[in-house]
Amino acid sequence: MFAPRLDHAVWEERPLIQDAVEVLEISKMQEIVTMLANLRDAAHQLPEGPERQNALCEIKDFQIRLAAFVRRLCSTA
């Protein structure tokens, strides 16, 4: 199953993001990426089953939407 790694994808394009967004917004983005990583770690600690799979699917969906948002920011820079 493909799970985008936002922590690397977001910060590799950081110079473009900095041009498009204020430093405060970058700080918020870093917090969101950290929270996503924590959520993913917590989901992996759930027992195997549908609850764990649902949690991982929700996190993956949010990662994909966040990556699309970052790409849009970079394309407007």
Image (cartoon, grey):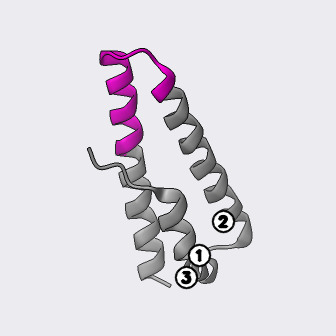
15 sits to left or right of 59:
right
**Sequence-wise first label, 3 or 2:** 3
26 sits to left or right of 61:
right
The residue at the point 66 percent across, 50 percent down is 31
Give SS at disc 3. helix
Task: Answer whether labels 1 and 2 touch (C-beta < 8 Å).
Answer: yes
61 sits to left or right of 35:
left
Q: Position of residue 38 (x, y in %)?
A: 59, 37
Q: Residue furthest left?
A: 1
Marks 1 and 3, how far apart in space?
Answer: 5 Å
Q: Position of residue 61 (x, y in %)?
A: 34, 44
Task: Answer whether labels 1 and 3 touch (C-beta < 8 Å).
Answer: yes
The residue at the point 40 percent across, 27 percent down is 55
Q: Give above or below for 14 relative to 45.
A: below
**Mark 3: amino acid:** Leu
Magenta segment includes 7 = no
Magenta segment range? 44-61
Q: Position of residue 7 (x, y in %)?
A: 54, 58
Instruction: Name the residue tied to disc 1.
Output: 14
The residue at the point 55 percent across, 82 percent down is 16
Q: Position of residue 2 (x, y in %)?
A: 29, 49
Instruction: Name the residue tied to disc 2.
Output: 26
Which quarter shows the N terminus?
top left
**Mark 1: amino acid:** Arg
Give SS at disc 2. helix
Magenta segment includes 60 = yes
Quick one: 49 or 76, which is closer to the camera? 49
Marks 1 and 2, how far apart in space?
Answer: 9 Å
Which label belongs to residue 16? 3
Q: Residues within 10 Å of mark 3 (few under 14, many from 20)?
A: some
Quick one: 67 or 8, which is closer to the camera? 8
